[in-house]
Image: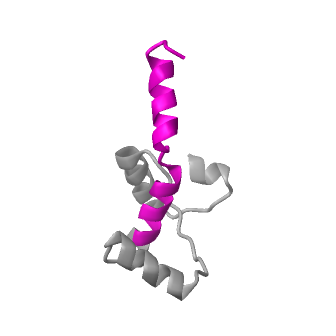
Amino acid sequence: MEAEKRGLALTRDVREDFLLCSAMCNALHMAANLSLDPDLIERALEVSGERTKKAAVARALEEVHRPTPAEALTRSYGEAGLG
């Protein structure tokens, strides 16, 4: 089990929850405590239209990883065998 490889001692209930979560979403979840500029978070909430800080941060991270139009065009040319 992934958690046991990392040296975590798990109770039976936690182990069952871990297995269920792994089976359902195929990903490990990570809690994070971040110290973020409150003004920046407020701006992100306003601009994004998201209702929670978590959603605003998730959306910002998605935007960072979204390809620019030029990158998308370059990728599509490569996939079509034109590049």
Q: Quadrant of the C terminus?
A: top right
> Where does residue 71 sit, x and y in percent of width and height?
52, 37
Q: In the displayed structure, would residue 2 be above or below residue 81?
A: below
Confirm whether the magenta stretch covers residue 77.
yes
Image point (66%, 49%), residue name: 5
Q: In the displayed structure, would residue 14 be above or below residue 80?
A: below
Which is more toward the observer, 23 or 73? 73
User: What's the magenta region?
Assistant: 56-83
Point out the residue furthest to the right here.
7
Image point (44%, 25%), residue name: 76
Q: How is the image coloured?
A: one colour
Q: In the displayed structure, would residue 38 be above or below residue 6?
A: below
> Where does residue 56 sit, x and y in percent of width and height?
41, 71
Q: In the displayed structure, would residue 51 be above or below residue 64?
A: below
Point out the residue furthest to the top here.
81
Q: Main secondary structure of the magenta part?
A: helix
Point out the residue furthest to the bottom here.
38
Image point (61%, 62%), residue name: 9
> Where does residue 11 sit, x and y in percent of width and height?
51, 64
Image point (52%, 55%), residue name: 64
Confirm whether the magenta stretch covers residue 69.
yes
